[in-house]
Image (cartoon, rainbow, N blue to C red):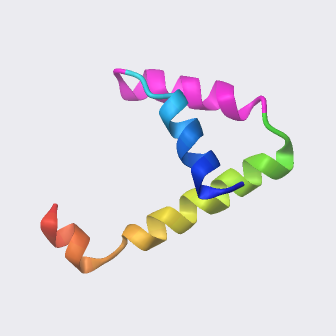
Amino acid sequence: MTEEDFWTIIEQTHADGMNQQLAALRSSLETLTPHDIISFQFTEQRIFDLAKRWDLWRAA
């Protein structure tokens, strides 16, 4: 899964509340193959790891 594919899924499952978004994300992920679900998770982890920078957290 490309990072673009990851962000497309995130954008398509955007909702007003966290619970609604999580439900939409789960429904979307259930349509993927097991390989794509694992790839989604690896992409998510890589993005989170990139965000673990002191300068970003300091700005927050």
Residue 54, position as x, y percentages in the image: 24, 78
The stretch of residues the image draws in magenta is: 16-31
Q: Residue at x 74, y 47 (%)?
A: 37
Residue 12, position as x, y percentages in the image: 54, 29
Q: Residue at x 64, y 47 (%)?
A: 5
Residue 22, position as x, y percentages in the image: 51, 30
Residue 24, position as x, y percentages in the image: 56, 24
Magenta: predominant secondary structure element?
helix
The quadrant of the picture occupied by the C terminus is bottom left
Residue 44 to residue 54: above or below: above
Q: Residue at x 56, y 39 (%)?
A: 8
- Direction left: furthest residue: 59
Q: Quadrant of residue 9?
A: top right
- Direction bottom: furthest residue: 54
Report the side of 38 relative to 26 (left or right). right
- Direction front: furthest residue: 4
Q: Quadrant of residue 50?
A: bottom left
Number of labels in the image equals 0
The quadrant of the picture occupied by the N terminus is bottom right
Report the side of 29 relative to 21 (left or right). right
